[in-house]
Image: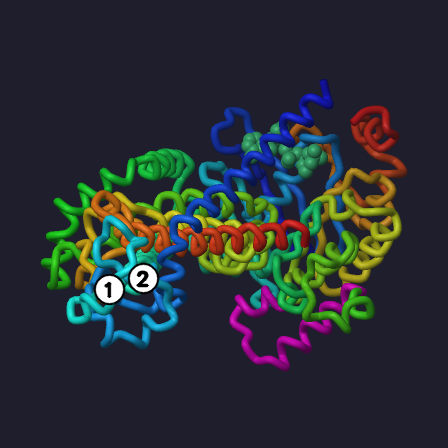
Amino acid sequence: MPVMKIKNFSFTYAGVEAPSLKNITLPIEKNQITALIGPSGCGKSTLLRSMNRIHDLYPGNKYDGKINLLDLETGKYNNILAIKKENEFIQLRQQVGMIFQKPTPFPMSIFDNVAYGLKIAGIKNKTELSDRVEASLKGSALWKEVHDRLGKSAMGLSGGQQQRLCIARAVAVKPEVLLFDEPTSALDPISTGAIEELIVELKKDVSIAIVTHNMQQASRISDYTAFMYLGDLIEYDKTENIFLNPKEKRTEDYITGRFG
Amino acid sequence: MEKLFQKISLSSATLVLVLLLGIFTTLFISAKPAVEAFGLQFITDQRWNQEIPLIESSDTVIEDSDDAIIADEDDEDMILDEDDEEDAATKTVFGGLVPIIGTLLSTLIALLFAMPIAMGIAVFLAEIASKNISKFVGMAIELLAAIPSIIFGMWGLYYFAPLIADTFGGYQVSLLTAGLVLGVMILPFMAAVTRDSMNTTPDVLKESAYALGATKFEVVKDIIFPYSKTGIIGSIILALGRALGETMAVAFLIGAVYSLPDKITDPTISIPVAMAVNFGEASGLGESALFYLGLILFVMSFAVISFAKFYFLKRGNA
Ligand SMILES: Nc1ncnc2c1ncn2[C@@H]1O[C@H](COP(=O)(O)OP(=O)(O)OP(=O)(O)O)[C@@H](O)[C@H]1O
Ligand SMILES: [Mg+2]
C-alpha cells in the first residue's frame, strides 16, 4: 500500500517558463525505501521538496496534479497540494520529515536539537521529552556516543554524527514519511555505512524516499527505484528489476554509467 | 617589492597605534590639572563651575595642590596669598557627574528605544518582506544611516521636541527628546547590520526547522537569532559607541543645563555637549575639566569598542 501517491504531478519554479517536473506519477510505498536516481538537474530534489511542500517557503512556484498522502488514522488520502493554511503546513511537515545533504544541526545543545520538533509540537512534560529524545538517539545509533554530553553544543559533533543527529531529530516527531536528499554525499565511507544501516533500520517505522547519486547505495538499501531524466519519470520498478533488467534503454545507460 | 609592501603596511599599523596613544596622552596632559585638583571625586561631583568659599569645603581641598585654587582664571599658577584675602578666598569646583549621567541615560534611552524597533525591522527585511520590498526598504534604511547628525538635531528640535512635550509633558528639550532622537539616529545602522547578520543564516538551516513543523516566528526565535547572535550584539555595541559620542544632535535637544534630571523629561547635559558648548569660553581649570570629561568619554567608548572586539575575536575562534 502506498503512503503517498503522486499523480500527474508537474512543477514549475517561480519566474521560469518550462516546468522542472512533467507529469510524474509515482507511489511511495509504505514501510519501504524508494530511491530517486537520475543525472544532475533532472528534478530529484524538486520532486522530493514537493512532498513536504518546503518549496512554499519561496513564493511563486506552480504545482499541477496531485500528491496524495495517506492519513494513517483514517486510512484516507489527502491531497497535500490543496494545503493553504499555516497550521496545515505544520501538520504536513510533522508527518513528512526531511533530511538534507549537509548536516544541519541547530545552534543549540544536542538534547535541544532532538527535542526541538517535540517542543514546538507542544510537548512540555520533561520526562516525556527526555524519554523520546533518548529513544530517538538510540534509534539513530547515536546514544552511545553522546549520552554523556547531551547538554553540549551540537556543533561539536563530527559530520557523520551531526547527520545522525538530524535523523534523530526528524524521527523524534514520529513522521509517516522521511525524505532524504543525498544524505551521505558529504560524508566519509564509514559514516555513510552507518547512515545506510540506520535508514534500513528505520523503515520498520517510516516510509522513506531517498535521492542518491550513488548507484551502489540505491541498489543496497532501496526496495523501489525511480529513474528520472530531464524532469520526466522514465522508469519506476522494484530496485532489482531496475538494476538487473531495466525496460528502458536510458535507464540501462544511466545505471551502467554510460551517461550522467 | 614584497619587503617594501610589508614595511609600508607595518608603518601604517604603527602609525595608528601612535595616533591612539598620542591622542590619549594629549588628552591626559591637558586634563592633568583637573585630575590633580579633583581626583576621582570628579566623577561623583555634580557641581560644575561653582565658586565656593575655601574654608567650608576644606574636606575636598586639603589634600589638593595649589592648582585647585584660582582667583583669576587667566593664571592658574598664581598662588593666593591667603592672609590677605581670607574672606574672599574662593575656589571653583568642577564635577563631571551631570554630563556623565546625562550621557549614560541618553544612550540608555536611545538603546531601549532603538533595539526592539531595529530588531523588528531586521526581521521584517530578512524574513518577512518580499525580495523587492526588502531591497527597497533596505536601501531607504541605509540612506537614513547616512544623514548627518546635525540634520537629525534640527529635525528633532523643530518637529520631534514639541511632539514629545505634548505627549509626555515637561520640557521640549530634555533627556527624553535627546535619547529618542539619538535612538532614531542609531536605529538604521542597527537594523541594517542586524539584517545583514540574519541573512547569513544558511537557507538549509531554516528549511530544516520548517521541515520539523516550525512556524516563521519559531524559526526567527530559535534559529536565526541564535545563529546571528554575534553579529546582532556587535551591531548593538557599535551603535552604543556611536550614541555615547554623538554631539550635534544631542546638543540641540538635551537642553545643555548642568542639573541632574529628576524626571526623564527634564533637560540636562551630556559629555560631548558639555565639551562643545563650553570650549569657547573655557580656560584654566575649566578647560582642563573639559579635557577630563573628554578623557572619561574616551575611556568609556574605548571600553565599549574593545569589549565588542574581544567578544568578536572570542566568538570568531570558537
Ligand atoms: N530555485 C530554482 N529556481 C529555478 N529553477 C530551479 C531552482 N532549483 C532548481 N531549478 C532547476 O530545476 C531543475 C531540477 O533541479 P533539481 O535541483 O531538482 O535537480 P536534481 O535532480 O536534484 O539535481 P542534483 O542531482 O544536481 O541535485 C534544474 O534544471 C534546475 O536548474
Ligand atoms: Mg538535488
Residues at discs 1 and 2 in contact (Cβ within 8 Å) = yes
Mark 1 falls within which chain? B
Picture residue at 16% right of the left edge, 71% below the top: B87
The residue lying toward the viewer, choosing from B210 and B291, is B291
Which amino acid type is shown beneath numbered disc 2? Answer: Ala
Residue corresponding to mark 1: B91
Task: Point out residue B294 in the picture as x, y percentages from the top left corner.
Answer: 37, 51
Q: Residues within 10 Å of mark 2 (few under 14, many from 20)?
A: many
Q: Which residues are magenta?
A: A115-141
Task: Tell me the element at label 2.
Answer: helix
Task: Classify the position of the N terminus of chain A by image quarter.
Answer: bottom right
Residue corresponding to mark 2: B68
Asked where in the image residue A228 lies, by quadrant, the reply is top right
Picture residue at 84% right of the left edge, 27% below the top: A253
Q: Is residue A244 left or right of B69 when viewed as pictured?
A: right
Residue A137 lies, with reference to residue B221, above or below; the image says below
Residue A161 is a magenta residue = no
- Residue B183 in view: no
Which amino acid type is shown beneath numbered disc 1? Answer: Lys
Picture residue at 78% right of the left edge, 27% below the top: A260
Task: Point out residue B242 in the picture as x, y percentages from the top left corner.
Answer: 38, 47
Q: Is residue B99 left or right of A7 when viewed as pictured?
A: left
Name the main secondary structure of what is drawn in magenta: helix
Picture residue at 26% right of the left edge, 45% below the top: B279
Mark 2 falls within which chain? B
Q: Is residue A82 left or right of A175 when viewed as pictured?
A: left
**Quarter, ligand 2:** top right
The residue lying toward the viewer, choosing from B72 and A188, is B72
Residue B86 lies, with reference to residue A12, above or below; the image says below
